[in-house]
Image (cartoon, rainbow, N blue to C red):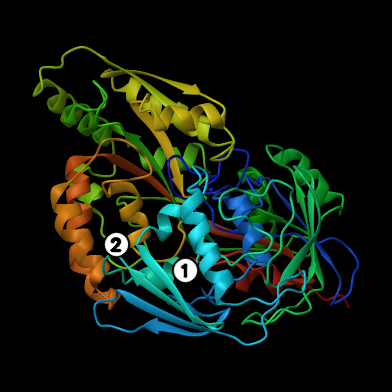
């Protein structure tokens, strides 16, 4: 979604001063001249591909490619809150405990190399991801699987270790794409930049950090209605200015997660004034979020008084105004607006404006009378170019209170990931792009015993009672109560401080259609929805 893992989880490549980044689960579109309804479309993005092997790629750029070249058993159609059949003809739980899940495949499924897709490929795909268990892969999303049975070529039965009502959502994510067992070894990742999938498109050409050329997979059978013949992805990783120039020169037809905030604002203002020169700008809600994470084992961040003081001081509204130019919304819970069970406990407990007096009182109650020296750790491009400016603004706010001596340090992503895994940082950033639109994906990866942030937080009530209760509940509307309790406990214990929730921005020329169908809170980029119609 949320875009690499730190431990586990889909990392948001957040929106920033340079990019409407991962914080926005949105498509930024602008059309080039010419073309007909069925022609190839060229897309630019500042995201990067971590791996072309689904067992080892768990970032936004990789999943963007996977979603359009592979199939999953289930998938989310536009606007849907529940997954529907994709490679499967039908799927469902066989028991009331949500521990046995059966799928029947569509007939005649084919990979792009011409091989038939059967239940053997499904079992192989899940088992290899779990076996390889790549530190940069999505294996943790499949951890509830105990055993996979394939009684015939079109039937797959999943037996789960414990009740998991979110299993249909998990297998609709790109953690569960189906690969050809003849092409993908069971115990190691492919590294040859080839893809053999059964999705809407096939990968014809790939140049690392340059481009990916996708053309229609003629043998595709699934739920998608394809509205273009091909999609070429041009990569502008870390170069939003270059992407902007490519758009202006008509070298690309649209941009995904890459235009600078000020450029979006400029285009939006022009559109509202009727001076958009044929460019349309619209926006809507997104479930992408950013958090400040506290390491509970750190001698400074481990003190509740310090965390409470920071919660009283961080001014989300100023952060959003000064750095993000109001392209995101303040977030006061770990479950964002629009997701089942959302509440605002951080607003209720700590307010929405800085309160230096309460912050000072929290520190004094713990015997802290001197400035608290803190370092906020970030990585620049993985969460978007705005990450460093955003955390410098947070440091400024903390220092302005006179209670903190905060600075910001940045590391390349590999060093940053390693530091998180080794527990070296007391305070660090985490962006999150959800794998599926269910409250579980905003809670379990952060607060389960084995969580993605490795910050030492372990709540007995959450892990022993509340998460098992939500996992076992097939009627997701009935999980509202437990999720409200989880949000309240997290706000009280403060292992994380939610900062903001993204918005989706769409910028398109009048001859580019389909942007309204391309992305929603399921965080699924659907290339096949785009078309160009001139005249």
Q: Residue 140: x percent and y percent?
A: 41, 53
The residue at 19%/50% (across/down) is: 348
Q: Residue at x 21, y 46 (%)?
A: 491
Q: Is residue 532 above or below residue 394?
A: below
Element at label 2 = loop
Is the residue 312 above or below the residue 528 in the image?
Answer: above
Q: Which mark is residue 342?
A: 2
Return the residue found at the far front: 151
Q: Is residue 140 above or below residue 145?
A: above
The earlier-in-sequence mark between 2 and 1 is 1
Q: Residues within 10 Å of mark 2 (few under 14, many from 20)?
A: some
Q: Is residue 26 left or right of residue 444?
A: right
Between label 2 and label 1, give the one nearer the viewer. Answer: 1
Residue indicated by mark 1: 171
The percent coordinates of residue 424 (x first, y second) are 37, 24
Give neighbour class at mark 1: few <14, some 14-19, many 20+ (Cα, 10 Å). Answer: many
- Please tell me which residue lies in front, 347 or 420: 420
Tag of residue 138: none
Query: Alpha carbon of mark 2 to alpha carbon of mark 1: how far?
Result: 24 Å
Where does residue 251 sit, x and y in percent of width and height?
86, 52
Q: Secondary structure at mark 1?
A: loop
Q: Residue at x 49, y 60 (%)?
A: 127
Q: Residue furthest top?
A: 370
């Amino acid at each position: 979604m949320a875009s690499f893992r730190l431990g586990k989880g889909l990392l948001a490549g957040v929106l920033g001063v340079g990019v409407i980044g991962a914080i926005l689960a949105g498509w930024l579109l602008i059309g080039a001249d010419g073309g007909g309804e069925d022609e190839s479309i060229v897309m630019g993005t500042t995201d990067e591909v971590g791996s072309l092997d689904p067992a080892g790629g768990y970032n936004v750029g990789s999943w963007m490619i996977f979603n359009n070249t592979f199939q999953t058993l289930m998938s989310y159609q536009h606007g849907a809150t529940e997954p529907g059949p994709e490679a499967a003809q039908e799927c469902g739980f066989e028991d009331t405990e949500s521990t046995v899940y059966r799928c029947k495949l569509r007939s005649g499924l084919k990979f792009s190399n011409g091989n038939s897709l059967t239940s053997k490929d499904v079992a192989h795909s899940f088992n290899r991801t779990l076996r390889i268990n790549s530190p940069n892969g999505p294996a943790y999303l499949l951890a509830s699987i105990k055993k996979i049975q394939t009684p015939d070529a079109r039937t797959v039965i999943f037996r789960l270790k414990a009740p998991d009502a979110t299993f249909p959502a998990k297998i609709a994510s790109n953690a569960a794409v189906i690969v050809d067992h003849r092409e993908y070894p069971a115990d190691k990742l492919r590294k040859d930049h080839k893809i053999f999938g059964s999705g809407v498109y096939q990968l014809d050409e790939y140049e690392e950090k340059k481009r990916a050329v996708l053309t229609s997979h003629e043998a595709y059978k699934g739920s998608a209605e394809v509205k273009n013949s091909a999609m070429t992805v041009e990569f502008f990783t870390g170069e939003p200015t270059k992407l902007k120039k490519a758009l202006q020169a008509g070298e690309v037809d649209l941009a995904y997660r890459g235009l600078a905030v000020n450029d979006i604002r400029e285009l939006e203002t022009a559109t509202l004034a009727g001076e958009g020169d044929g460019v349309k700008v619209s926006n809507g809600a997104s479930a992408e979020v950013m958090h400040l994470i506290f390491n509970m084992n750190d001698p400074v961040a481990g003190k509740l008084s310090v965390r409470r003081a920071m919660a009283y001081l961080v001014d989300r509204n100023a952060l959003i105004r000064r750095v993000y130019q109001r392209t995101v919304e303040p977030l006061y819970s770990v479950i964002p607006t629009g997701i089942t069970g959302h509440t605002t406990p951080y607003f209720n407990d700590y307010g929405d404006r800085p309160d230096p007096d309460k912050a000072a009182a929290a520190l004094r109650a713990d015997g802290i009378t001197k400035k608290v020296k803190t370092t906020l750790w970030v990585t620049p491009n993985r969460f978007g170019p705005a990450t460093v400016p955003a955390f410098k603004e947070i440091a400024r706010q903390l220092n302005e209170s006179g209670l903190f001596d905060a600075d910001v340090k940045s590391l390349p992503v590999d060093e940053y990931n390693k530091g998180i895994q080794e527990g070296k940082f007391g305070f660090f950033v985490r962006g999150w792009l959800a794998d599926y639109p269910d409250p579980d994906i905003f809670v379990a990866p952060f607060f389960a015993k084995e969580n993605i942030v490795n910050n030492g937080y372990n709540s007995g009530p959450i892990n022993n009672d509340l998460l098992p209760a939500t996992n076992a509940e097939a009627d997701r509307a009935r999980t509202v109560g437990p999720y409200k309790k989880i949000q309240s406990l997290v706000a009280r214990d403060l292992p994380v401080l939610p900062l903001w929730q993204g918005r989706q921005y769409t910028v398109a020329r009048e001859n580019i259609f389909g942007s309204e169908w391309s992305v929603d809170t399921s965080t699924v980029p659907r290339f096949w929805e785009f078309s160009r119609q001139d005249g």
